[in-house]
Image (cartoon, grey):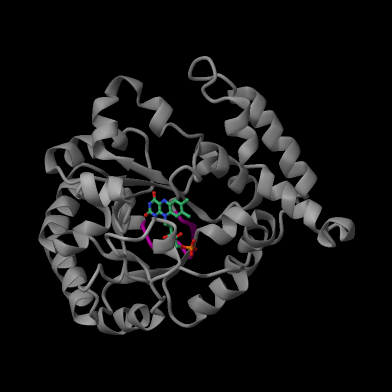
């Protein structure tokens, strides 16, 4: 049996976020929740291929980060194949392909990310190539459309073509479209309206596939409600980054029905500090540096400070 045979979509996952969900953030998150699936930042296939001699600094993680998903991006089938093969040695639980990033660097110059929603045939081929080079499950993360290609029918075509051409059975749907010019990446996560009705229609129209809902979900209570409405999985990004304790702290109990670990926020910070000290400079002088490590603690602690009445009153 391969890993992918045993795969079922994560009930709760932390979204891939470039510059945010690095190994340090994931370490902190894993101290708070044992069950949430962790997605890496997107890595371009080319980065993996060209850094073949330096892969650990991009792909290594500690075993307690399982279940963990590598997100890759790219437009070149040969590089996608090679990158997946190189990553396979690291034992990720799932390889996710990025078809949702609207950043000009990715969808413009790089010609991948959300732009790929206009070329489902290529995505189907890419997913076949990725699947052929890994033991892990393969999934796609996408928007509900791009620019004027934003009808429900076009979204269905996208899903249908990819799932027919490749072994992809699970899609993560950031439930707003992307605009490929005129909006910054952060506006592209805020301005195009959320259309959850498209997501729920996919559940109805593709009963053999699995779908994870993403976009604008702010709490574990809302995540739980989405699961109860039929979503196979829920992915949260900004809410868990900005408010890790009050979101991730409830995932294991509310979503997975596990008993609370009882860990306190102080214990999380203490354990994280031990981790931080152990990895400072691991990949050479200043890699990582103190700032890289401390950055992800800020929201855990800010959150703590904001519960003090004096701070709240500021
Ligand atoms: C700083 C930042 C970086 C992101 N980087 C990625 C990325 O590398 N790959 C990706 O698929 N989505 C990326 N996203 C989008 C998120 O994965 C997610 O789809 C989006 O934030 C909507 O979910 P949310 O409303 O729960 O935050 C990023 C989002 C943020 C805020």
Quarter of the image where one finds residue 86? top left
Can residue 1 be seen in the rendering of this structure?
Answer: no
Q: Is residue 26 above or below residue 139?
A: above
Quarter of the image where one finds residue 279? top right
Q: Is residue 94 above or below residue 168?
A: above
Quarter of the image where one finds residue 223? bottom right
Quarter of image, ligand 1: bottom left
Query: Residue sitting at 47 percent across and 42 percent down?
Result: 19
Which quarter shows the C terminus?
bottom right
Q: Which stretch appears magenta?
A: 7-15
Where is residue 221 shown, x and y percent of the image? Answer: 62, 74
Where is residue 248 shown, x and y percent of the image? Answer: 62, 58
Q: Given the current orientation, which residue lies at the most extreme front position? A: 182
Query: Residue sitting at 64 percent across and 54 percent down?
Result: 244
Where is residue 186 shown, x and y percent of the image? Answer: 44, 57
Left or right: 93 as drawn, with respect to 29: left
In magenta segment, residue 11: yes
Query: Residue sitting at 23 percent across and 80 percent down?
Result: 151
Q: Main secondary structure of the magenta part?
A: loop
Left or right: 120 as drawn, with respect to 222: left
Please tell me which residue lies in front, 169 or 41.
41
């Amino acid at each position: 049996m391969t890993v992918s045979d045993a795969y079922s979509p994560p009930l709760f996952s932390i979204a891939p976020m470039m510059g945010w969900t690095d190994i340090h953030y994931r370490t902190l998150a894993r101290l708070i929740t044992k069950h949430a699936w962790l997605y890496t930042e997107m890595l371009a296939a080319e980065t993996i291929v060209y850094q073949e001699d330096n892969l650990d600094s991009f792909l290594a993680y500690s075993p307690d980060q399982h279940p963990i998903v590598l997100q890759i991006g790219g437009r070149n089938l040969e590089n996608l194949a090679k990158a997946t093969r190189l990553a396979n040695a690291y034992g990720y639980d799932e390889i996710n392909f990025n078809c949702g990033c609207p950043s000009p660097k990715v969808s413009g110059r790089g010609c991948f990310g959300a732009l790929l929603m206009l070329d489902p045939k290529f995505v189907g081929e890419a997913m076949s190539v990725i699947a052929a080079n890994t033991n892990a499950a393969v999934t796609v993360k996408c928007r509900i459309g791009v620019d004027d290609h934003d009808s429900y029918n076009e979204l269905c075509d996208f899903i249908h073509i990819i799932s027919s051409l490749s072994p992809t059975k699970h899609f993560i749907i950031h439930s707003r479209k992307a605009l490929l010019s005129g909006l910054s990446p952060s506006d592209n996560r805020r301005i195009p309206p959320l259309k959850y009705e498209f997501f729920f229609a996919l559940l109805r129209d593709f009963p053999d596939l699995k779908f994870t809902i993403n976009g604008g979900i702010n709490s574990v209570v809302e995540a739980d409600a989405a699961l109860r409405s039929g979503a196979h999985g829920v992915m949260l990004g900004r809410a868990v980054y900005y408010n890790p304790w009050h979101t991730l702290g409830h995932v294991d109990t509310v979503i997975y029905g596990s008993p609370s670990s009882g860990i306190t926020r102080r214990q999380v910070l203490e354990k994280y500090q031990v981790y931080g000290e152990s990895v400072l400079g691991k990949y050479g002088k200043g890699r990582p540096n103190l700032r890289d490590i401390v950055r992800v603690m800020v929201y855990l602690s800010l959150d703590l400070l904001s519960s003090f009445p004096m701070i709240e009153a500021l």
